[in-house]
Amino acid sequence: MNALLVLAWRPFLDPLNVHDIWWAFLVPLSFGISVVYKAVRMHSLEGYWKQVAIMTVQIVLCMIALGLASFLLIMVYVKYMAN
């Protein structure tokens, strides 16, 4: 019985330990969001994959910019506010 429990992987109860490479999931996640959003919002599917690619790049670049902005806010601006 215990051997079956050890071999079984329960995704929501035993998540994978991928905390060190979380950034690798940014592109697939943003691609999936773009595919679904564009499929729902576009009136015709003409130019669908081009729009999906553009939105995927926009999401990735905005997430990088938000990460950089929060880093600068915490590491640079807060030091000047504390003095």
Image (tube, grey):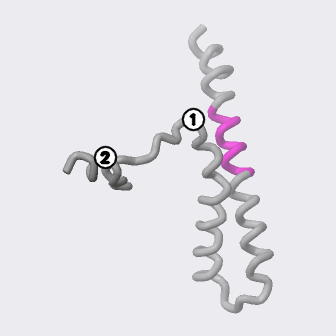
Q: Foreground: 7 or 79?
A: 7
Q: Is residue 3 above or below residue 35?
A: above
The disc label shown at residue 50, or none: none
Label 2, label 1: how far apart the Cα atoms are: 24 Å
| Residue on which disc 1 sits | 20
Looking at marks 2 and 1 on the same chain, the residue that comes earlier in the sequence is marked by 2
Find out whether residue 48 is within the magenta segment: no
Q: Foreground: 35 or 37?
A: 35
Element under disc 2: helix
Position in image of residue 19 (x %, y %)? 52, 38
Q: Residue at x 35, y 50 (%)?
A: 7
Q: Main secondary structure of the magenta part?
A: helix
Q: Amino acid at mark 1?
A: Asp
Q: Residue at x 80, y 75 (%)?
A: 50
| Residue on which disc 2 sits | 6
Element under disc 1: helix
